Image (cartoon, helix red, strand yellow):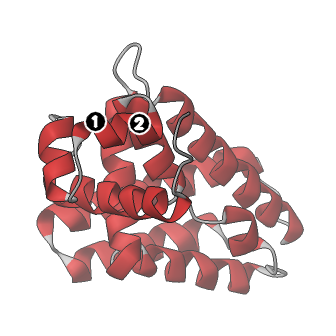
Amino acid sequence: MARPLDHAKRAELLHGVVEYIAANGLAELSLRPLAAAIGTSSRMLIYYFDTKEELLVQALATQRPDIAALFADIADASALRECLTDFFESSLSGDGATSVRVLLQVLGAACAPGSPYARYAHDAIATFVAELSAALRRVDISDDTEAVATLLISGLRGVIQDRLITGDVARTARAAQRLIEQSIH
């Protein structure tokens, strides 16, 4: 009889996987070094998650912010600008930075034909566009809200990536602020 899954251990493994990807990258991820780094075996990772791809998709799912909650209380353009500015800054520090580093790697990997991350990346972007579009409609942005949401999401993602690569806080903060202000007026 198979032993039941230890859900606390599973959650601990997922957290370790995210930390490992943030520190070591996704491109050449191998189960043995990953397992050793998080204190388990590759056999146990397969036991808990079946495949490396499923392990990574589940680890990523633990990092997805609640985008609906992020924009739920937005009632005016000023609050939306402030919310996006706060989201930008929180994406670059603490747990937010870990999640963003991992997400940026997944988005890059999702571009490859047949990528196992394509569905996850598509869903993450679609959710963000839908929720931000709804917030834009609530604050009476008369432009094409999907296009404005896409511009904001893609633009901020690029500015975040720029900051993570260059470390230029002042320039990237100005760029993010300008993008937000010009998109939500």
Against 170, residue 147 (above or below) is above
Residue at 34 percent of width and 49 percent of height? 104
How many C-alpha atoms fall within 10 Å of the one at disc 2: few (<14), some, or many (≥20)?
A: few
**Image quarter for residue 142?**
bottom right
How many C-alpha atoms fall within 10 Å of the one at disc 1: few (<14), some, or many (≥20)?
A: few
Q: Toward the viewer: 98 or 11?
A: 11
Indicate the amino acid at tag 1: Arg
Q: Which residue is mark 1?
A: 43
Q: Toward the viewer: 11 or 99?
A: 11
Q: Could you say where residue 105 lies in the image, as x and y percent from the top left?
A: 30, 45
- Which numbered circle lies on residue 159? none
Mark 1–mark 2 CB contact (< 8 Å): yes
Residue at 38 percent of width and 14 percent of height? 113
**Image quarter for residue 152?**
bottom right
> What SS does tag 1 mark?
helix
Q: Could you say where residue 52 lies in the image, as x and y percent from the top left?
A: 34, 32
Indicate the amino acid at tag 2: Tyr
Against 49, residue 99 (above or below) is below
